[in-house]
Image (tube, grey):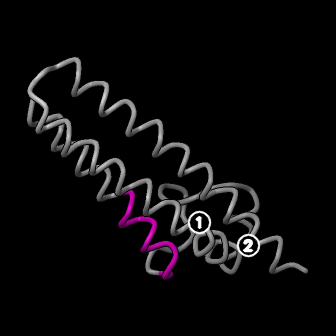
Amino acid sequence: MIVGEFVIVAAGILVAAVARGTATGRIGRNHFAGIRTKRSMADDESWTIVHRGAQPWMIAGGALIVLSGAIAAAVPAEPASAIVIGAGVVIALACTLAGVLAGHRALSERAR
């Protein structure tokens, strides 16, 4: 099942790359990639502020997805690799939520 683990690793790399691209402004406001909430989509400045605040958490989430895919590829037993991937994805989703909250907190602080 190496193909499945490869897809997981590639998805993690994509998450981290999008996090970096949106935080640096290389990926502008759009309807396909990034944190797309009412507040982040309000204008280009809000988009950038939210993504800069979220970047560390989003990159951590992407790295955890990569790590879980790599570990799952090294674990020969099917149930164990599924558990590793599942745990990695759950933790990565928690990082994503923390990133969204951190990004919106940065936007709120900017408004003060």
Seen in the picture, residue 13 relative to 8 is either above or below; the reply is below
The image quadrant of residue 31 is bottom right
Q: In this view, does 68 lie to the left or right of 93?
A: left
The C terminus lies in which quarter of the figure?
Answer: bottom right
Seen at 29% across and 59% down, the residue is 13
The image quadrant of residue 29 is bottom right
Q: What residue type is labelled 1?
A: Ala
Q: What residue is disc 2 on?
A: 106
Q: Pointer 2 and pointer 1: residues touching (CB < 8 Å)?
A: yes
Q: Nearer the viewer, residue 94 or 12?
A: 94
Q: In this view, does 72 lie to the left or right of 31?
A: left
Badge count: 2
Give the percent coordinates (x, y) of residue 27.
46, 73
Q: Which of 105 and 18 is in front in this view?
A: 105
Prevailing SS of the magenta stretch: helix
Q: Which mark is residue 108?
A: none
Seen at 73% across and 72% down, the residue is 106
In the rendered structure, which segment of residues is drawn in magenta?
Answer: 15-25
Whole-number angstrom distance, CA of label 2 to CA of label 1: 9 Å
The N terminus lies in which quarter of the figure?
Answer: top left
Determine crowd level at label 2: few under 14, some 14-19, many 20+ residues with C-alpha closer than 10 A. some
Seen at 52% across and 69% down, the residue is 55
Seen at 69% across and 55% down, the residue is 37
Give the percent coordinates (x, y) of residue 110.
80, 80
Q: What residue is disc 1 on?
A: 54
Seen in the picture, residue 81 relative to 110 is either above or below; the reply is above
Determine crowd level at label 1: few under 14, some 14-19, many 20+ residues with C-alpha closer than 10 A. many
Indicate the secondary structure of the residue bearing disc 1: helix
